């Protein structure tokens, strides 16, 4: 909208210059500078008196500090106004990003340089014409998407990363409202987000309201919003910032276990909250974990087994001590039934928790492990010792017999030799 | 099988012994194949996080495919085990025969004797009966392993059904037991079983069912002695020739009335025995006579079997010996003494 109007104004300005040049040629004297009409304009006409030639040194604010109407190709209109007091990304000049509007009239302005739209008095009109600037873009969103490409100039890495994201996939499937850079970051006033992690869920909530509602009441969300806790994940910590992935991605499900484990196996971090760091190892030791691990390593498609978030929830994660948690002992039957159908109340007890077996908590399992750790080496060791002794004896016997046989055959050879000698 | 009926003569005249029936050999084949499959697929799943385990699973078509193969092999293994259990119960309680595989005190003494021998403290090699203590250990380890693996495997295969009755913690306990027992069983087979059957001797009787007489003398001399005493007793008893099995050699073309024992041995000696006189010792001649007698083709068994006790006429699984062994032993010993007495040796032409 703004750029279209800028383009239009540029065209108009160029047209006005051409007209004035023509006029000036007629009068045989071309003034060095052209003056802007100083008549009292209507509300939608530029009012500022720019310094120098606005058309040439790009004083965009001459036009764009006031509301301007843009009409798009599909007939929709939009009012654009830019508050010159708002901060601009890196304090760039407008034309750093709006390169197509660096000249006047603006390149893609549909007004084709009709200077009379602004310079209506010069053109001899008594009333200002409607200040509608025609854009060549289909609609406002198309204009935004087109403008969005300028981010790539400086942020090539992030721009390329977004091309791999699920948002880009949605865009490619035909939804123009899939988020692009400016949707999350803003277009002119782009705050630096590193310092404000609490902004991330709020930005994502523009589209993902349901997940945001769940997240806000979750153990991660409350810690983030209430205490700005640096340890808890925001949306982007699990889903990525630019190469955003989601459940529709094949590898998301299998890789999710490493996402959770990145923090939940970090002893320094987890000790602050008294959370076990055996979560990943105990999970991988189970049926679910082994299957998911295998699928992950073989890059298989969707894994048909439980990952962390299948039991703990994805956005509504609560502490296991929270009665509302999906892994609270009395809630587990429902959680397990999601996949396993109707199960008895004893079925969830088959999962002994993300803890290494101990004698106090899981005596049977502990004793089995300990018992066999002793039994197997003892029995096999006993076997090997017996076999070694037996083999040694048999080998020694075999060697002795072989020597005896050789001795006998030598004797008989000697006898034969003697017989030969004696018979010769 | 009846001890005597396990003697056979090959075409070249050498004697051999049937050690395992074809049913037993089939069971072993099924066990062999299913155990190997179970071991590979099971250990690959357990050690999925290792490169070898992962490679095996990948080669099998994924972890789910490996599980399916594991289940199929487990089914075969289970069916074989159930059949074995059933047939053993049948023989124990219907035939009332105690298998020789049950442990005895003599096994313990044999173990100590072997240890003394292997350590060099003794020169005496223990004499083994039908099953050495090593073989009994293997068998009972297999029974122990099968029970544990079968039970824990089923528990993991049907956790929902199991937890509808039993507490849930039994599933991870079953998993631990299953994994550990698998390791123990596989290692036991690789060390104990393979040493005793492939390295110590190349005893392939479990595949071809037979052992030669020298092998029997080397590995199971007590059993061989019993069999030969039984054969001799049979020869001299009035139950001869009623206990001949149908499987033996084809009957002669002419049917003759039951001859007297002496005539049988003479006739057999004329037809069958071809032992060089130089090598024949008294005992050997007697053995030949006994076997030749045992192999003599006679008329139809069915007609004769009416006179015999039913239990004696039944062919039974080779692992079970006669419970009336003691009966045979008493007359046998006296006759055996006579047998070694030169005057009472039947007039064989050897």
Image: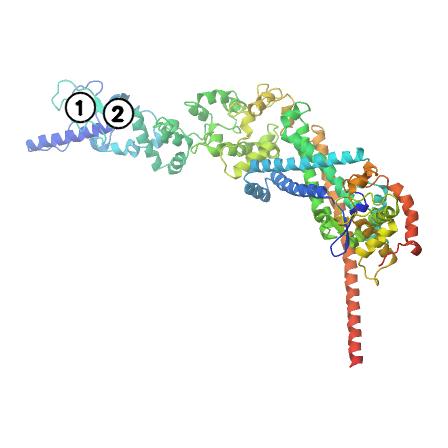
Q: Which residue is mark 1?
A: A117
In the image, B131 versus A58, the foreground residue is B131
Query: In the visual, does A301 lie left or right of A266?
Result: left
In the image, A104 versus A58, the foreground residue is A104
Using the numbered discs, state the Cα–Cα distance from disc 2 to disc 1 in whole angstroms.
15 Å
Label 1 chain ID: A
Query: In the visual, does A243 lie left or right of A142?
Result: right
In the image, A367 versus B93, the foreground residue is B93
The image quarter containing residue A51 is top left
Can I make out residue A132 in this image?
A: yes
Query: In the visual, does B41 lie left or right of A398?
Result: left
Q: Which mark is residue B242?
A: none
Q: Which residue is mark 2?
A: A64
The image quarter containing residue B65 is top right
Name the quadrant of the N terminus of chain A: top left
Which structural element holds mark 2?
helix
Which residue is located at x 78 percent, y 65 percent? A405
Can I make out residue A371 in this image?
A: no
x and y percent of residue B145 in the render?
72, 38
Q: Are marks 2 and 1 in contact (CB under 8 Å)?
A: no
Label 2 chain ID: A
Which residue is located at x 37 percent, y 30 percent? A173
Few, some or many residues within 10 Å of mark 2 (<14, 14–19, 20+): many
């Amino acid at each position: 909208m703004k750029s279209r109007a800028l383009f239009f104004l540029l065209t108009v300005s160029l047209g006005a210059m051409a007209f004035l040049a023509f006029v000036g040629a007629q009068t045989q004297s071309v003034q060095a500078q052209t003056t802007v009409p100083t008549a009292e304009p209507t509300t939608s006409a530029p009012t500022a008196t720019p310094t120098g030639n606005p058309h040439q040194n790009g004083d965009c604010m001459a036009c764009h500090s006031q509301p301007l109407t843009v009409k798009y190709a599909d007939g929709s209109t939009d009012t654009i106004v830019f508050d010159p007091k708002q901060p601009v990304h890196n304090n760039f000049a407008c034309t750093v990003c709006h390169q197509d509007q660096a000249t006047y009239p603006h390149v893609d302005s549909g007004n084709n340089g009709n200077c009379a739209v602004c310079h209506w008095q010069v053109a001899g009109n008594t009333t200002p014409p409607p200040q509608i600037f025609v854009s060549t873009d289909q609609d406002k969103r198309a204009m935004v998407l087109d403008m969005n490409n300028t981010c790539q100039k400086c942020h090539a890495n992030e721009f390329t990363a977004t091309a791999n994201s699920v948002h880009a996939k949605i865009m490619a499937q035909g939804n123009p409202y899939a988020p692009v850079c400016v949707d999350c970051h803003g277009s002119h006033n782009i705050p630096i987000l590193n310092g404000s992690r609490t902004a991330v869920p709020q930005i994502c909530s523009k589209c993902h309201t349901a997940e945001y509602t769940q997240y806000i009441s979750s153990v991660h969300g409350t810690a983030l919003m209430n205490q700005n806790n640096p340890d808890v994940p925001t949306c982007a910590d699990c889903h990525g910032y630019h190469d955003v992935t989601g459940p529709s991605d094949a590898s998301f499900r299998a890789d999710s276990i490493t996402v959770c484990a990145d923090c939940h196996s970090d002893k320094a971090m987890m000790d602050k909250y008294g959370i076990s760091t055996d979560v990943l190892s105990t999970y991988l030791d189970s049926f679910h974990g082994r299957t998911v691990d295998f699928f992950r390593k073989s890059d298989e498609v969707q894994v048909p087994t439980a990952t962390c978030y299948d039991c703990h929830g994805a956005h509504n994660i609560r502490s296991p001590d929270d009665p509302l948690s999906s892994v609270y002992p009395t809630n587990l039957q429902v959680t397990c039934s999601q996949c396993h159908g109707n199960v008895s109340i004893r079925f969830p007890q088959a999962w002994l928790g993300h803890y290494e077996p101990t004698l106090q908590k899981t005596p049977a399992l502990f004793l089995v492990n300990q018992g066999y750790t002793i039994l197997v080496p003892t029995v096999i060791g006993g076997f090997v010792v017996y076999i070694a002794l037996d083999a040694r004896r048999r080998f020694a016997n075999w060697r002795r017999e072989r020597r005896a046989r050789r001795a006998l055959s030598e004797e008989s050879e000697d006898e034969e030799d003697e017989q030969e000698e004696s018979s010769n | 099988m009846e001890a005597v009926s396990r003697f056979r003569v090959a075409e070249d005249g050498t004697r051999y012994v049937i050690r395992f029936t074809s049913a037993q050999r089939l069971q072993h084949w099924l066990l062999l194949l299913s155990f190997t499959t179970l071991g590979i697929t099971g250990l690959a799943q357990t050690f999925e996080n290792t490169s070898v385990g992962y490679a095996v699973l990948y080669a099998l078509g994924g972890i789910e495919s490996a599980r399916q193969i594991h289940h199929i092999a487990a089914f075969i293994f289970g069916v074989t085990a159930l059949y074995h259990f059933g047939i053993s119960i049948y023989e124990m309680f219907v035939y009332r025969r105690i298998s020789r595989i049950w442990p005895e005190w003599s096994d313990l003494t044999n173990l100590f004797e072997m240890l003394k021998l292997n350590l060099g403290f003794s020169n005496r090699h223990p004499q083994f009966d039908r099953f050495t203590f090593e073989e009994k250990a293997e068998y009972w380890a297999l029974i122990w392993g099968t029970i544990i693996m079968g039970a824990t495997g089923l528990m993991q295969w049907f956790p929902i059904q199991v937890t509808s009755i039993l507490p849930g913690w039994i599933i991870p306990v079953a998993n631990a037991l299953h994994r550990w027992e698998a390791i123990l069983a596989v290692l036991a087979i690789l060390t104990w079983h393979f040493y005793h059957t492939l390295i110590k001797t190349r005893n392939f009787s479990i595949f071809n069912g037979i052992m030669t007489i020298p092998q029997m003398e080397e590995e199971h001399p007590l059993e061989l002695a019993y069999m030969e005493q039984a054969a001799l007793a049979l020869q001299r008893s009035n139950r001869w020739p009623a206990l001949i099995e149908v499987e033996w050699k084809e009957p002669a073309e002419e049917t003759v009335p039951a001859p007297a024992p002496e005539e049988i041995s003479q006739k057999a000696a004329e037809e069958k025995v071809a032992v060089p006189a130089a090598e024949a010792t008294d005992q050997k001649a007697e053995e030949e006579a006994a076997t030749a007698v045992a192999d003599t083709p006679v008329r139809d068994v069915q007609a004769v079997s009416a006179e015999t006790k039913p239990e004696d006429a039944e062919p039974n699984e080779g692992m079970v010996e006669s419970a009336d062994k003691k009966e045979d032993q008493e007359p046998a010993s006296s006759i055996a003494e006579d047998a070694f007495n030169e005057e009472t040796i039947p007039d064989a032409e050897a």
